[in-house]
Amino acid sequence: MTTNGHAVREGYRWIRADLHIHTPASEDYAEPNVSYLEILQEAERRELEIIAFTDHNSVHGYEKMRQEIDFLQTLERAQRLTEDEQRRLHEYQRLLDKITVLPGFEFTSHFGAHILALFAPDRPISLIEATLLQLGVPPDLLKHGACSVPDTRHVTDAYEIIARAGGMVIAAHANGPNGVITETLRMGTSGQARIAATQHPSLHALEFVNFYTDHEKFTSPGFYNGKTEHYERRMFCIQGSDAHRLRRTTAGDGNAWHKHGIGDRYVELQMPANTFAALKALLASSEFDRVRVPKRDQKQWEVDTMRAGQSSERQVLRGNSPEALDTIWRDVLALANMGGGVVIVGIEEQGAGVVGIPHPEQASELLRRQVQEQITPQPYITMELMNYEGRDLIRMEVRAPETPPYMSRDGVLYVRRGSETVVADRGEIIQLCRRAIAEGASSPLDNGQDLELPRSGVEIVSAQKRAGSWLYEVRDLRTTAGVTRERAQGLWSYAISRYEDLRDGRIDIQSQVKWRGRLGLWRAYRQGNRTKYDLVHRDANGVIDHVFFGVSDWGLGEGWQALLSERDGDAIEQEPRAFRDDPPFPPDLMNGELPSPESEPDWGERRYRWRGRGGLWQIQDAEDGPRFDLAMKDKEGTSTQEFPSVPRDKITDAWLSLIRVQRPRTGIEVVSMSNDENGEIRFVFRNLRTGEVSNAPWRLQDIEDGTVRQYAARMALQDSELDEQKVRWWGNVGYLRPMRSQVDLVYRDENGVDHVYYAARRDELAGEWRELLEEFGEL
């Protein structure tokens, strides 16, 4: 017998497992109020038969679940269970008959690499905690689920200790942050050390993130197939969810790294039973064809997100009942009036149960015929059969090729109101009609002011995000596509900056524009000896649809001229900073010289950073960890008491809230530098605007000339040992190399680690970073 090309032994079956799940016992868990019963219920919903609780440096999550079950069983024996407690106990018993839950932990090794340790369910908690103590986790942190624990054992030592204790050893997210591959590259260790970290005899498997994404060597599962020189041992390569919540959240919500839910990334194992013994025997064998990693596409993630309650007015879930199938055309009509959207047929909206479509061909034909018969004008729909959790679903994508309104054959208009399809009310009908007028020919609402483009200045025509960078299409007497903010200069740089302020809601343009009909003057400013204007145009609904930056008064049409003549007496602003002769990067970037006043010996300076009565002078590195120089003012603020060299374990949450500072929202951080096997330096970057970290390390020669990334790499080489005499410190934040429009920022975190943020734009700094420059008179 074969399944998807994999032969199945007699008496064996494919078992779905997620071996990397966190619980509220981890300090960074995103949903601390989730119960352990809810975690098991979600595992059942995702058809998992083996899961592992792997909290940070702790087995306390598994312990708390067992304590709850033991307590309920004690009450049952004493016949003291309430009805709700009886229900919970029976639900636990039902789920644990189906799902094997392995106790374990995610250990943080000495240099930061994470390791999963999994044990048999009958392993005493005390013995698992004894293993954690051997690994260097302090007794007072055993129940904390702490992400960071200092002075623990090294990676290979940890492998051996866990294996001797009877545990399975898996390198967690090996090619991601805090993975053994990434950390060995970052530390620049020898090739032998990297081989040991991924090939050690005690290591059972490597867990990968983005399993099917192309990677460079070291970071791809295919690299560990036993055919690579020096990496001759073939490894089991798996994936796990690393779930810090029940269900997947949207990418922009909270910590993007912890967006996955239980079972989002799972592995399938061909075994005779869902037991620890069967799993350990498999991973100790060489039967690699008994492990497979299913590939999920973006449309399946979309369904996950909709089921998790993230659906919007453009997303609809519908079941397979005759009543549902007969009314889906209304959803299609409503989505067309919204401009388009998606309907997933085969999932119940209430409870989000996956019921599937028993006869998808007949259902598809019915849905297509209903749309054709019931809706005018005809929306454009595509239907796609997709398999989801073992059932067939129909995915309908709706587009609106013509301007709304769309209506039913009996003249009814449907719209989406929140998550419901409803009959449009009077206000909604008026809005649809206004939109039709605005997108059609000119009308009396236009006040006779059809748009006439200025003959100078620039307009941001479109923006799209590719590979973590925003690309802009700039109209500048000609249309130029693919412009990045980092490459733009002068007027283009200014236009992109203002456009991003509008896009991200940092400017309320409506309150600043002075209107004449549909034409508006946003601002006038001096550039050299000429006056330039930022002009806007609004449609018939009053929605701004064009913004023109840096327009000269020559060649303007009659309507624009009339607008400007009415504003002759208004104040004219000073020249925007982006126009001044300050290039986007230091002029001597290419020769690697520092563009800072390093010749001035008194450049560096240090001042207290206060919040309320508490103040931070500095964080110093010491043999036993970071030390903090703190101070407190009395209630009247007249005297100050200093507390020098406070150790990390004495720092309370109140002090941590002062010490911790969010990253700026602009610039580039060099996350790590390391030497590859050829001795070449490789860089990993974080784009602070998007928060995205480059998937694979970059070589300096592969970085595009003149980019902020190249500047950051070259400066990072010089800042590898930060010279504090060249930093102006305000507590644990500081800056160096100030330029006219940009600045390099420094942050020393609670662990004494320095982070340098290169080429941060001054005009976008906020919070402590803006206050830092104000403190030293730089703004």
Image (tube, rainbow, N blue to C red):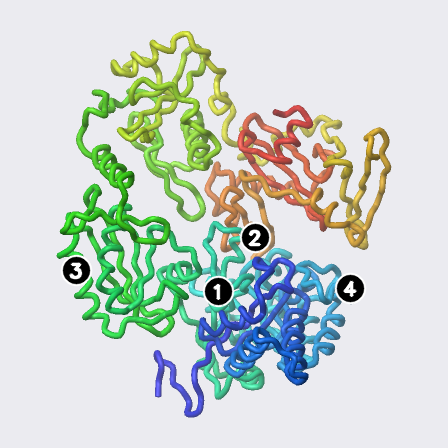
> Which residue occupies 73% across, 69% down?
135
Q: CA distance from mark 2 to mark 4?
A: 42 Å
Q: CA distance from mark 4 to mark 1?
A: 38 Å
Q: Earlier in the sequence, mark 3 or mark 4?
A: 4
For label 4, the residue is: 140
For label 1, the residue is: 220
Q: CA distance from mark 3 to mark 4?
A: 66 Å
- Tell me the SS state at disc 3: helix
Amino acid type at image mark 1: Ser
For label 2, the residue is: 680
Give 244 or 494, whichever is nearer the viewer: 244
Q: CA distance from mark 1 to mark 2?
A: 20 Å
- Tell me the SS state at disc 2: loop
Q: How many marks?
A: 4
Residue 232 pos. (x, y %): 53, 75
**Looking at the figure, which quarter contains the C terminus?**
top right
Q: Earlier in the sequence, mark 2 or mark 4?
A: 4
Residue 775 occupies quadrant = top right
Could one spot residue 230 in this view of the protein? no
Give 100 or 587, whichever is nearer the viewer: 100
Q: Earlier in the sequence, mark 4 or mark 1?
A: 4
Amino acid type at image mark 3: Gln
Farthest-out residue, bottom:
10
Q: CA distance from mark 3 to mark 1?
A: 48 Å
- Tell me the SS state at disc 4: helix
Q: Residues within 10 Å of mark 3 (few under 14, many from 20)?
A: some
Q: CA distance from mark 2 to mark 3?
A: 63 Å
Q: Is 555 left or right of 625, judged from the image as shown? A: left
Q: Nearer the viewer, mark 2 or mark 4?
A: 4
- Mark seen at residue 370: 3
